[in-house]
Image: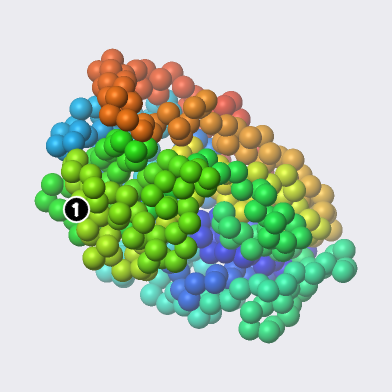
Amino acid sequence: MPLKVLIIGAGVCGPAFATLLQRADPSHEITIIERAPRMRESGLQIDLRAQGIPIVRKMGLIDAIRQRAVPESGVALVDARGRPFASFGKNDSGHGAQAFTSEYEIMRPDLVDVFYRASLGLSAEKDNSNNGGKTPQTWGVVSSGNGNVRYEFGVTVTNISQHDADVVEVTFSDGRMAKYDVVVGADGQSSRTRRMILGGKEASDACFKPLDLFVAFYQIPRSPIDDSWMNWHLMTGRRAIVTRSADVEAPTQVYMTIRTSRKENAFGICTAGSTTEQKEAFAQAYMDEDAWRAKEFANALREKTPDEKFYATEIGQVHCQKLVVGRVVLVGDAGYCPSPITGMGTTLSLIGAYVLAGELAKHGKDGVPDALTAYAQTVRPFVNEAQTLIPGLPGMLYAKSKFGVWVLTTFFWLISKLRVVDLLMKFTPEPEKSGGLEIPEYPELGLTS
């Protein structure tokens, strides 16, 4: 029997889950709401790793993702004059694990668009004659050909109630009320769904475990000196700058990262509230630095970067022990963000979407509670694996003094020259798993093997 499902959030996870569930049974009635007025066209460069690769392969979308992949060559550490002194190339041999740069690097809006189009039953292949492959109408209300998958933009949820054990009653920001068999919170690290089902902001905020790292992301016009490498410059004051510019048709991405705690609040980063204050705090933190392109990037941030092209956040992990409350379930960063430094955020979201869709398809409408319980139990080992950090990270990547920076740069120079990373990638597990964990099989999803 078909399910009536509400998905909150149209990022990577929501549309991927909708695609999987709809393919299992096209008669499911699926609504995806997104607070933004349209599909977001900005975002970071992300990647697929480990179990995420076989999932998209099973979905038949690996070629569409490969077609849109960013041709980044690898990671290069550069000195104060911009000269690379250590480099780590990507592993595109088809053997061993992905390196620091994945074979499947892709801009977030492109990956979202692949799943968005697939969920609507449209071709996910990039069509340069059609707005770069983007679906022209991505605002208001958009439905699939049979009308069973529906996107609503500019809408949020204001209340969730479960007085009836078999139904979730939802109130929307436009005053409507509707009932669903399942509600899926796929609304990211700062999930409002998590806040509502856990009983408030305090309980929700307690799930966030800070890693004492703050990052600002923005884009600047591409320069002739920008290349296909991710360039990483280490600085004193526990700071770093990263640029990514492999996509020659897109602006250069700039990341400013500062290692500080909320208590220490270096450069006033932690207490900068509005977007204007955040931009100024990060610009000030780099204006006094003559090394590499620090002042250039600080001036660009202060003078040329519009607010809508700037994003700043605190890096951390979400450790939510309760992923299911009644018939409301958290998926992806809303329930178990591993943090960007693990490189597993996108993959873990896809694992969650795949397992949830698989368990719902396996148990059917009458077995929704059992399906949600099985999802929470099945996904937990993957969450624990992805959230396990190498001891000392991220702190050991940031140095306060010149001597500390020298130690770090010497270490990276040495392992680059000895090709240690190449050997590690060669003898670590195949891309289809991480930590020995393989995704379960769900024949009920009707995917390719």
What is the three-letter code of the residue carrying label 1? Glu
Determine which quarter of the picture holds residue 39.
Answer: bottom left
Locate residue 304, reporting x and y percent. 24, 66
Residue at screen point 61% across, 73% down? 156
The answer to which of 250 and 293 lies nearer the viewer is 293
Any part of residue 438 in sight: no
Determine which quarter of the picture holds residue 329.
Answer: bottom right
The mark total stands at 1
What residue sits right under mark 1 in the picture? 296
Residue at screen point 68% across, 60% down? 201
Residue at screen point 57% across, 64% down? 9
Left of 290 or right of it: where is 302? right
Residue at screen point 13% across, 47% down? 225
- In the picture as drawn, the residue positioned furthest to the left comes out as 224
Locate residue 299, reporting x and y percent. 22, 58
Locate residue 105, reporting x and y percent. 36, 45
The answer to which of 348 and 35 lies nearer the viewer is 35
Left of 179 or right of it: where is 75? left
- In the picture as drawn, the residue positioned furthest to the right comes out as 164
Image height of 278 relative to 52, above or below: below
- In the picture as drawn, the residue positioned furthest to the bottom comes out as 175
Any part of residue 292 in sight: yes
